[in-house]
Image (spheres, rainbow, N blue to C red):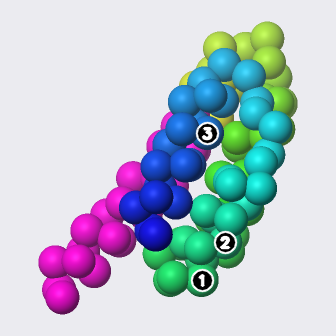
Amino acid sequence: MTRHALDILKSAQEEAAVDPVRGTPAMRLALSWLVMDGVAEAWQATSFWLAATKPPEAPDRPLALYVRQRDMQIYIDRWERVVHDVAGRE
């Protein structure tokens, strides 16, 4: 289930590459699952949600788009690392 949740969020990240996406029940469930499973912290899930669904603060500046993408990637990378580390200990 955790792998599927990460796949949903990666897909949302790809869709949000240029423009924000509409938050979906699948995204909300995936983020909730990661928090419940101890992979993500609640504030990280909230930050990912905002990065994916809200327009950049300065859409006319290329850096704002980069920062949005970077923020989403940082969380996905961290969550994948947590999943990998936990799986390695089992």
Q: Are marks 2 and 1 in contact (CB under 8 Å)?
A: yes
Q: Amino acid at mark 1?
A: Met
Q: Nearer the viewer, residue 34 or 50?
A: 34
Gap between marks 2 and 1, in whole Å? 6 Å
16 horizontally vs 53: left or right: left
Q: Is residue 48 above or below residue 21?
A: below
Q: Residues within 10 Å of mark 2 (few under 14, many from 20)?
A: some
Residue found at the far bottom of this picture: 90
Q: Quadrant of the C terminus?
A: bottom left
The residue identified by callout 3 is: 12
The residue under label 2 is 32
Q: Residue at coordinates 76% horizontally, 33% vertically from top-left?
A: 21
Q: Earlier in the sequence, mark 3 or mark 1?
A: 3
Give percent across and percent down for residue 35: 60, 77
Q: Which residues are magenta?
A: 69-90
Local SS, label 1: helix
Residue 76 numbered tag: none
Give residue 43's position: percent from left, percent from top. Answer: 69, 70
For the residue carrying disc 3, how many other residues have a C-alpha within 10 Å: few (<14), some (14-19), or many (20+)?
A: many
Q: Which amino acid lies under the numbered mark 3 shown in the image of this protein?
A: Ala
According to the picture, the residue beneath numbered tag 1 turns out to be 36
Q: Residue at x 51, y 82 (%)?
A: 37
Q: Is residue 22 left or right of residue 68?
A: right
